[in-house]
Image (cartoon, helix red, strand yellow):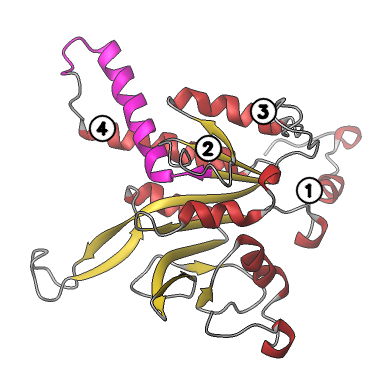
Amino acid sequence: MATRSKSKETDYLAIARRNVTTPSRLKSYRRILVYGRNKKGKTTFALSGGTRAETLVLDCEHGTDAMLRRDPYVWHLNKWEEIDDVVGAIKTQQLSPKSLGKGPEEEPFKWLVPDTLTRFNNLALRRVMRIAEETNLDRIPGLVDRRDYFKSGELMKDMLMTFHALPINICYTAQERMKSVNTSDDDEDSEEAEYLMVPDLPDAVRGAANSWAEVIGRIYVVRIDNKPRRRLYVGINEKYDTGYRSDFTLPDIIKTPTLPKLVELMTEGAKPAAENGKSSSS
């Protein structure tokens, strides 16, 4: 290591004072990942974060087209390159209904909803395939190469890292798939094979999404008195990709879940039943 003259010595304590902080001194934003089967309420849950004017949906599959009553603010994405436009707009911290000329509200959107990560992954794969087809004359159009999956996975991980740094709360949604896990050296048809319910993403992308998220929840529906009721499972379970980071202990299952209810549990903990004043059967 090269020595420095005394007049040019680096003040490492000054550098440390500028960089060391504590969580309580930071302005933090929530990072939630919720997954489940089709039509189980993923987007509905993600839209519960605030008023209509507080949430912006990034819709890759026109899943919000039928939501005429809620009428959410939606940014439709058809190509991977359009994600850069979204990131740039949010970084201005001025993206609001009024700045869009769509409403009177001046406050920037508080929640961003990428809906769904499964579809975003498809956009990344299409992007990689299109570049390969344009640069390789021997490439068969529409045929996926094994290397495409790796490259699209890197795009997805880069997007997740970029989104994580944005000054906005984020609720990701994803489809659900069943993943087989062998407990023996036999093939997947072995009686010892087990199955997990996980977000429908390539394993490397799923690992990155899980690591960035503060809460990973599986949404599902049960019937009580012949009426459908939504549930969000967030407890640690060997059968599901679920879990959370919080100073408080969250219930394994959140009944009739909403984002405000989840955030309150994360930041303040569960309140006594008498204080809640709500029936446990809802």
Where in the figure is residue 94, as x and y percent of width and height?
76, 32
Q: Earlier in the sequence, mark 2 or mark 1?
A: 1
Label 3 secondary element: helix
Point out the frontmost of discs 3 and 2. 2
Tag 4 residue = 147
Q: Earlier in the sequence, mark 2 or mark 4?
A: 2
- Specify the amino acid type for callout 3: Ala
Residue in the image at 70% along x and 41% along y = 109
- Specify the amino acid type for callout 4: Arg
Label 2 secondary element: strand
Q: Quadrant of the N terminus?
A: top right
Point out the frontmost of discs 4 and 3. 3
Real-space Cα separation, disc 2 to disc 4, in angstroms = 27 Å
Point out the frontmost of discs 2 and 1. 2
Where in the figure is residue 159, as x and y percent of width and height?
51, 37
Where in the figure is residue 153, as x and y percent of width and height?
37, 39
Disc 3 crowd rating (10 Å Cα; few below 14, some 14-19, many 20+) is: few
Where in the figure is residue 74, as x and y percent of width and height?
56, 35
Real-space Cα separation, disc 4 to disc 1, in angstroms = 39 Å
234, 261: nearer the viewer: 261
Real-space Cα separation, disc 4 to disc 3, in angstroms = 32 Å
Tag 3 residue = 89
- Specify the amino acid type for callout 2: Leu
Residues in magenta? Answer: 114-140
Q: Is residue 137 magenta?
A: yes
Q: Quadrant of the C terminus?
A: bottom right
Tag 2 residue = 58
Disc 2 crowd rating (10 Å Cα; few below 14, some 14-19, many 20+) is: many
Disc 4 crowd rating (10 Å Cα; few below 14, some 14-19, many 20+) is: few
Label 4 secondary element: helix
